[in-house]
Image: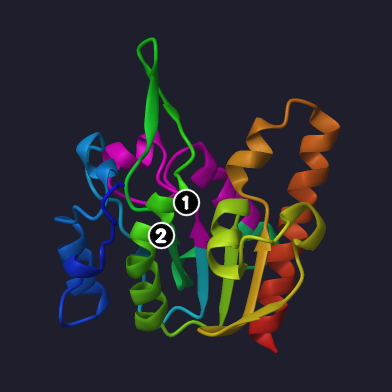
Amino acid sequence: MPLQMSASEFLPAKRDLSSLRKAAEGCRGCELYKRATQTVFGEGRRSAAFMLVGEQPGDQEDIEGRPFVGPAGRLLDEVLLESGVDRDLTYVTNAVKHYKWEPRGKRRLHKKPSSRELSACRPWLDAEIAAVRRAVIVCLGATAAQQLLGRGFRITQQHGQWQSIESCESCMATWHPSAVLRVPDSSARQQMRSELVADLAKAAKRLRS
């Protein structure tokens, strides 16, 4: 039977963002650290009222050590601007802090984290949520949504709907920018992008009210 994996033993006694970020650099709570370049922790202000949670770092994020700086991050910047959300006032993070990938020639391709890996990394996400003074959490993509809203959550049917969780009364899920980029059909891609903007605008309106 495989050993239970968890990041909980690597969490520091002091749970402010600076202490968490530094401690996460040495996390060995699951096997993903072995192939990743580095830990990619969340980024943003402790006072951020808007928190975005994605799935995991991508190839460029793994290299730079910052969340949402690759192609999906550039699209996120665009849709946040269109929806009236200031990224400088948001906290962005991922459910998993190390890049999981598989080789494809000379390229490193994203591989979805397993449920065990998600569970192992959950203590970091819970600590971030507790440390950030957010009023709204938006999950980007199905993996992040199911991590916070339950495994039965279906983003195709429930995106943009407000949910209440123990740590936040105003939580919703929407499409991950990388999912938008992967849609081959241009009209379907534009439709998904429009839904992403509308969901984020809805979250911004909740903040203003």
What's under tag 2, amino acid-wise? Ser
Q: Is residue 151 above or below residue 184?
A: below
Q: Who's the residue at 20% across and 38% down the image?
A: 34
Q: Is residue 152 magenta?
A: no
Q: Who's the residue at 34% across and 75% down the image?
A: 127
Q: Are marks 2 and 1 in contact (CB under 8 Å)?
A: yes
Query: Is 143 on the left-hand or right-hand side of 124?
Result: right
Specify start and end residues of the magenta stretch as a single range: 53-79
Q: Who's the residue at 47% across and 51% down the image?
A: 115
Q: Which residue is mark 1?
A: 115
- Using the rendered image of the protein, determine whether residue 174 is visible from the camera's viewpoint: yes
Residue 93 location, quadrant? bottom left
Q: Is residue 57 magenta?
A: yes
Q: Is residue 94 above or below residue 135?
A: above
| Secondary structure found at label 2 | helix
Q: Who's the residue at 28% across and 61% down the image?
A: 6
Is disc 2 surrounded by few (<14), some (14 to 19) or many (20+) residues within 10 Å?
some
What's under tag 1, amino acid-wise? Ser
Marker disc for residue 119: 2
